[in-house]
Image (cartoon, rainbow, N blue to C red):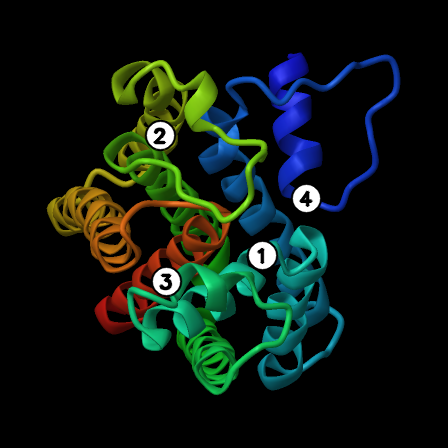
Amino acid sequence: MNNLAGAWIFYTTFPKLPFITPKFKNIAQFSPIIGFFIGLIQSLIYLILRNNSWSAYASVPICVASGYLITGGLHLDGLMDTFDGIFAGKNKCLKAMKDSQVGAFGVQSLFFITLMQIACLLKIQSQIISILPICLFWGRFSTLIFIDKFQYITLETKSIQHKKYWNGFKKESLVSLTFIFIFIFYFLFLDKSADFIIKQIFLLLIGFFISYAIPKFLGSKIGGFNGDACGASVVLVETTMLFINAVLL
């Protein structure tokens, strides 16, 4: 419970829960579940606005902005820093990522991703509550693969890092995978049509593949992983999954 509370506080801007002492140790395993509930909150915000006569074109940007507010822009900051680092070249990558000033490639990545997410959500609309939480789940699941496959890199001599408390991918991913399997099979039980089952199995497989491929690509580009690269992976995976769902619809 303390680790889950630590994950909730570390990954969001919500205040500390009363009577609970949050711990940083092993909180990475809860990151995908936190992402799922952030997506659920965003979806509810969208649906509440739509049910109160707001247009989709007004509701979707607020839905996207609410995600930025809940996370404090943590992952977007990582996205911009990572793109600046990649395009600076391997020798200057970490230095560019650490620079407090955002470069041109960082700004472009933010602009492109925001427009992509808005466009995808406009296509999804009424099905947002069954799609957005899962997309955010896979985005954060990618960080588990990142941590497992790569070594932590930083310019700082001391830094809080997940790798220090890592217990292996199988153990760290067990909670999240159990959670998402229960959620998906619940919907399979409700809708037993062959087309729906095939689509959900496909999305499950593609979600795991995308959450593996993107951190693998980023890790090879920067030579390891750090907080910024994990943030970039989260945003890129969730946006890719949103796009795939929008295309399938």
Mark 4 vs mark 1, CA separation in Å: 17 Å
Mark 1 vs mark 2, CA separation in Å: 19 Å
Decide if residue 3 is on the left or right side of residue 92.
right
Mark 1 vs mark 3, CA separation in Å: 19 Å
Disc 3, disc 2: CB below 8 Å?
Answer: no
Q: Nearer the viewer, residue 247 or 138?
A: 138
Q: Position of residue 105 (x, y in %)?
A: 43, 82
Decide if residue 194 is on the left or right side of residue 215.
left
N-terminal of the pair, mark 4 or mark 1, is: 4
Write the residue at 82% across / 25% down. Answer: 17
Write the residue at 58% across / 56% down. Answer: 43
Image quarter of the C terminus:
bottom left
Q: Give residue 12's mark.
A: 4
Q: Amino acid at mark 1?
A: Ser
Crowding at dot 1, Cα within 10 Å, few <14 / some 14-19 / many 20+, comes out as many
Image quarter of the N terminus:
top right
N-terminal of the pair, mark 3 or mark 4, is: 4
Write the residue at 22% across / 45% down. Answer: 212
* Residue position marked by numbered label 1 in the rendering: 43
- Give the quadrant of residue 158: top right
Q: Nearer the viewer, mark 4 or mark 1?
A: 4
* Residue position marked by numbered label 3 in the rendering: 236
Q: Position of residue 201 (x, y in %)?
A: 16, 42
Mark 3 vs mark 4, CA separation in Å: 18 Å
Decide if residue 88 is on the left or right side of residue 60.
left
N-terminal of the pair, mark 4 or mark 2, is: 4
Q: Nearer the viewer, mark 1 or mark 2?
A: 1
Q: Is residue 126 visible?
A: no
Q: Give residue 186's mark.
A: 2
Q: Nearer the viewer, residue 143 or 242?
A: 143
- Give the quadrant of residue 69: bottom right
